[in-house]
Image: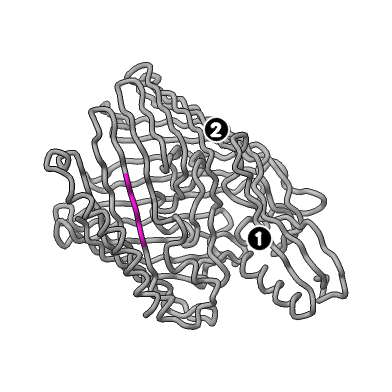
């Protein structure tokens, strides 16, 4: 109950302050303010029955408020706080203490967006905490500007998974059909993953802590430190994107230079070895999680065919990204041995078309290619499961969406298939009870070998429901 009371205080105090401040504005000022928000409660329940997780995965309530204030015809200020509290961490006392940080809003994460906009015919400037989206695929290829929150794998909406950063975004449009975007990002955050034994903790994470406890029980230690880039201008991330049209084709050319948004594990030292647990030395391990500088070159294209004929109504999309010097894990199946940089070549092609008027079919073909399949006698590993990975990993995704009852009932399904016979199937149903009240029911099914990115969650199918009230 103490945590619930703390949550109510954390949520209510900022909201009261905002409302009181807004009530003090004169009527003329109030006309320049636009507000929107929602309150949402969601329940996630585990379907598979095993000893690793109980049935209740999450019982989370989220309060979200967006406010935009028009300062003048060219200047706008946007403020977007969001709080959440997961009551499952109070109901389930057996949750490990290290999971509590996932049960409520941490530090400054309550502030999703906070920026100042300058908008004109040729020049747009946005300064502050924000998101930048470069990609258009179901799996990120060009969408590499922002770090991700993978605490719930890839199940939430991508907009909710991106972790906003403080930055300057400048967009210049020399003509109506072209623009040049410049990004300066002095901020840095680390892509987050589920902590040990949380519903979507990586297999590699759980295995690491199992070994850690074994080593410590035998008298050793395993120390891990996170080494983020120093907050200096030279450590900033820089980005450029040119967008234009060539006839009916829209295209972009992209460049990004900076530290990786993910951190990677390195063994710096092993000292005081006193024995072995099988093949595992017992001693004092010193690990560091580091970000490394990478460089991305990419392009995208998009065209909708509107002329009568076979292609009428078809939308064709594509992305390509070359990533230079991205940290990569190598080892044996289930065990990382070294971390080395390698170049990556990733691309995706998407076809989208409506059939029978209201049925949207979106098919995507994606490949992720690693330049170096082996290093120092070790094989390429998947970052999440530490399973052996092919030099070329191929994915197929299919999304089907439609609507009934004049748009009030909106079902959709996403199928993700990897070429090692693993993947996930996620059907959802959204129903509008009234203009400001939505209900969602969904199911997430995983399949494949336990050493594959989706197969590692094969005993973690989830049924979920959400109630969302908007205002």
252 or 23: which is nearer to us? 23
Percent x, y of residue 280: 80, 71
Taking the image as shown, residue 361 lies to the left or right of residue 450, namely: left
Q: Residue furthest top?
A: 174
Q: Does residue 173 appear to the left or right of 183 in the view shown?
A: left
> Visible in this render: residue 248?
yes
The residue where tag 2 is placed is 238
Q: Is residue 464 visible?
A: no
Question: Could you say where residue 281 lies in the image, as x and y percent from the top left?
Answer: 83, 70
Mark 1 or mark 2: which comes first in sequence?
Answer: 2
| Mark 1 vs mark 2: in front | 2
Q: Residue 307: percent from the left, percent from the top?
A: 27, 26
Magenta-tinted stretch: 79-83
Where 400 falls versus 29 (above or below)? below
Please tell me whether the stretch drawn in magenta is mainly helix, strand or loop: strand
Q: Residue at coordinates 42% horizontally, 25% vertically from top-left? A: 243
Q: Read off the residue under disc 1.
A: 387
> What residue appears at the point 76 percent right and 58 percent down from the top-left corner?
267
Q: Secondary structure at mark 1?
A: loop
Q: Give the Cα separation between the discs numbered 1 and 2.
A: 33 Å
Q: Residues within 10 Å of mark 2 (few under 14, many from 20)?
A: many
């Amino acid at each position: 109950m103490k945590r619930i009371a703390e949550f109510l205080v954390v949520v209510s105090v900022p909201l009261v302050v905002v409302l009181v401040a807004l009530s003090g504005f004169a009527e003329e000022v109030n006309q320049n303010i636009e507000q929107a928000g929602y309150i949402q409660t969601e329940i996630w329940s585990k379907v598979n029955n095993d000893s690793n997780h109980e049935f209740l995965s999450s019982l989370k309530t989220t309060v979200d408020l967006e406010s935009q204030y028009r300062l003048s015809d060219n200047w706008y200020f946007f403020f977007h706080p969001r709080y959440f509290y997961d009551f499952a961490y109070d109901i389930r006392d057996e949750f490990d203490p290290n999971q509590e940080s996932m049960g409520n809003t941490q530090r400054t994460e309550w502030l999703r967006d906070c920026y100042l906009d300058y908008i004109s015919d040729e020049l747009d400037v946005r300064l502050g905490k924000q998101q930048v989206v470069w990609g258009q695929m179901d799996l990120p290829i060009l969408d590499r500007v922002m770090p991700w929150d993978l605490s719930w794998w890839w199940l939430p909406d991508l907009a909710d998974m991106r972790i906003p950063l403080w930055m300057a975004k400048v967009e210049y449009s020399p003509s109506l059909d072209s623009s040049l975007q410049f990004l300066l990002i002095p901020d840095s955050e680390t892509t987050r993953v589920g902590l040990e034994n949380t519903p979507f903790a990586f297999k590699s994470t759980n295995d690491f802590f199992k070994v850690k406890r074994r080593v410590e029980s035998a008298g050793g230690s395993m120390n891990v430190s996170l080494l983020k880039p120093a907050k200096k201008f030279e450590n900033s991330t820089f980005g450029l994107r040119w967008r234009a049209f060539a006839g009916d084709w829209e295209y972009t050319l992209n460049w990004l230079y900076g530290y990786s948004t993910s951190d990677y594990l390195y063994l710096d030292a092993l000292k005081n070895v006193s024995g072995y647990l099988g093949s595992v030395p017992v001693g004092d391990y010193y690990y560091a999680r580091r970000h490394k500088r990478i460089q991305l070159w990419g392009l995208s294209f998009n065209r909708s065919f509107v002329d009568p004929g076979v292609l009428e109504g078809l939308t064709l999309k594509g992305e390509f990204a070359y990533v230079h010097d991205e940290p990569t894990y190598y080892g044996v199946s289930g065990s990382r041995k070294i971390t080395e940089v390698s170049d990556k070549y990733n691309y995706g092609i998407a076809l989208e078309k409506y059939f029978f008027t209201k049925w949207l079919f979106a098919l995507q073909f994606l490949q992720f290619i690693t330049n170096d399949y082996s290093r120092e006698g070790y094989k390429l590993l998947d970052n999440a499961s530490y399973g052996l990975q092919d030099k070329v990993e191929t994915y197929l995704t299919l999304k089907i969406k439609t609507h009934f009852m004049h748009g009030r009932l909106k079902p959709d399904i996403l199928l993700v298939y990897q070429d090692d016979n693993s993947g996930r199937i996620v059907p959802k149903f959204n129903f509008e009870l009234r203009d400001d009240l939505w209900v969602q029911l969904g199911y997430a099914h995983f399949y494949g070998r336990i050493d594959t990115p989706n197969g590692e969650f094969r005993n973690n199918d989830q049924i979920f429901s959400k109630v969302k009230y908007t205002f």
